[in-house]
Amino acid sequence: MAEKGMDLNRFILEEERKHPSASGSLSLALMALESAAKIIASHVRMAGLADVLGQAGKVNVQGEEVQKLDELSNTVMLQHLLDSGQFYALASEELNEPVYSHKGKDAKYVIAFDPLDGSSNIDVNVSIGTIFSIHRRIGDSVENFLQEGYKQVAAGYIIYGSSVMFVLTTGNGVNGFTYDPAVGMFLLSHPDIKIPEKGKIYSINEANAHKWTDEGLVRYIDKLKEEGYTSRYIGSMVADVHRTLIKGGMFGYPADRKNKSGKLRLLYEAAPMAYIIKQAGGRSTTGKMDILDVKPEDIHQRVPVFIGSKKEIDQLLEFIS
Ligand code: P6P
């Protein structure tokens, strides 16, 4: 296990050395992500002062008002990832269609990302985050993004909270790196993260309970209450899932009569988070199947999401499957 305090770049290179056939492309890809994360973190930290808050007055592909930080984060991600030359194509929550990279026309990977998830929380200074999912390139067009989540090469998120953390898996466990702005480096603070087998917290927007379409979900939540669980729901997926990873329990965004497939996006929210949690020893489900087994049909496809500790997810499936 890597030593605490190791910086992210050295960690990435040492992981590369474990794969003699590695070309170094994934390392360069992850380092480009790291650079983008540092710049986004700087702007998020200054948001309250730089008058970046407020609506940019535009509506994104999700039909949501775009905050200026959303736009800026998307631009920073595109700039660094395209410039790295390590990605054949990029898909973003903020863009209708994927971007195909000239510099990456022979690249081995594609990436899907949510540049700034939870952005509706920017104005109230709640933790928000960037989520990413990296797959191998398998073709010349959109099929690159329609791969099941279990095929991900790497996935993770950067949470911009009381501290900035880069949480990453490349398929060999989960490691968390906390940003030290004094030296401008992400330092290994949470080596080999494992989600507790069982938690004491459930995280779900109960205001939607009367609309949930999963029969038994209300009874499941009532059972957790009887077992003494507490509720924590921030309304920022990266923050809610990060707490679940560290403390255990479950996070859910179910389907309801209004959102027939739930609200969260498969490619760049549910699948990368499910991969992180699985690599940390947890479970994920749509209520019907493991999130990582879902074959995407559209790059902005939504899925119902239940992610967390083995005990809570196994117990959930006794109530809703
Ligand atoms: P609701 C934030 O807008 C987001 O996309 C996720 O980060 C979060 O988990 C969810 O929506 C919150 O949705 O309907 O509970 O406000």
Image: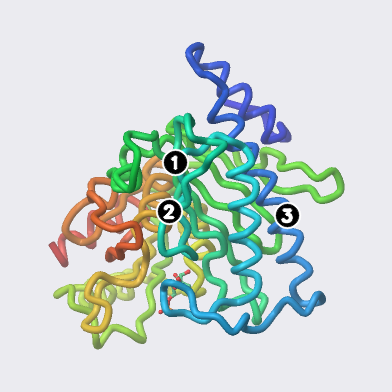
Q: Which residue is mark 2?
A: 98
Quadrant holding the N terminus = top right
Please determine whether, in this image, residue 279 is positioned above or below residue 251. above
- Disc on the earlier residue, 1 or 2: 2
Please determine whether, in this image, residue 71 is positioned above or below residue 178. below
Say whether residue 202 is left or right of residue 57.
left
The label on residue 295 is none
Please name which of the two marks, 1 or 3, marks the residue nearer to the observer: 1
Say whether residue 180 is left or right of residue 140.
right
**Callout 1–callout 2 Cβ contact below 8 Å:** yes
- Disc on the earlier residue, 1 or 3: 3
Q: Please name whichever residue, 277 or 61, is drawn nearer the observer in this view of the structure.
A: 61
Q: Which residue is mark 3?
A: 39
Secondary structure of the residue carrying numbered label 1: strand
**Residue drawn at point x = 27 percent, y = 78 percent:** 259
Secondary structure of the residue carrying numbered label 2: loop
Say whether residue 195 is left or right of residue 158.
left
Amino acid under label 2? Pro
Amino acid under label 1? Val
Q: Which residue is mark 1?
A: 110
**Residue drawn at point x = 63 percent, y = 24 percent:** 13
- Quadrant of residue 269 within the rendered picture: bottom left
Please name which of the two marks, 1 or 2, marks the residue nearer to the observer: 2
Q: Residues within 10 Å of mark 2 (few under 14, many from 20)?
A: some
Q: Residues within 10 Å of mark 1 (few under 14, many from 20)?
A: many
**Residue drawn at point x = 71 percent, y = 42 percent:** 186
Q: Residues within 10 Å of mark 3 (few under 14, many from 20)?
A: some
Secondary structure of the residue carrying numbered label 3: helix
Please determine whether, in this image, residue 116 is positioned above or below residue 311. below
Please determine whether, in this image, residue 250 is positioned above or below residue 193. below
